[in-house]
Amino acid sequence: MEYLVNLHIEKLPEGFYLATSEDIQGLVAQGQTLTETLAIAADVAKQLLEAQSGRDNLSPLNALKDSFDYSLIVNG
């Protein structure tokens, strides 16, 4: 099943990007580019969800719907 996980992205003064999420406790990812940071965040989210899958206290995530809004970043 696919889930919609909200990320908070912050560009650090050192030039790196930091991603965290209130949806998945413990999700922290850092990369040199936004694309790299998002890929790392997706991998970390998957690992955390797999690790928490046997627990009863897992907070419910939003299942991915057939229609949703997405912010597209375009270089111009």
Image: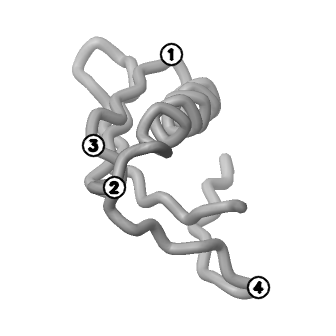
Q: Which badge, 1 or 4, comes first in the chain's sequence?
A: 1
Depth order, front residue of 23/48: 48
Badge 2 amino acid: Asp
Q: Position of residue 28 (x, y in %)?
A: 34, 29
Do callouts 3 and 4 mark residues in contact (Cβ within 8 Å)? Answer: no
Label drawn at residue 32: 1
Q: Quick one: label 1, few (<14), some, or many (20+) residues within 10 Å?
A: few
Label 2 belongs to which residue?
Answer: 56
Q: Quadrant of residue 58?
A: bottom left
At x 71%, y 61%, the residue is: 1
Mark toward the viewer: 4 or 2: 2
Depth order, front residue of 9/29: 29
Label drawn at residue 66: 4
What is the spatial separation of the Cα atoms under label 3 and label 4, in whole angstroms? 26 Å
Badge 1 amino acid: Gln
Q: Position of residue 23 (x, y in %)?
A: 34, 57
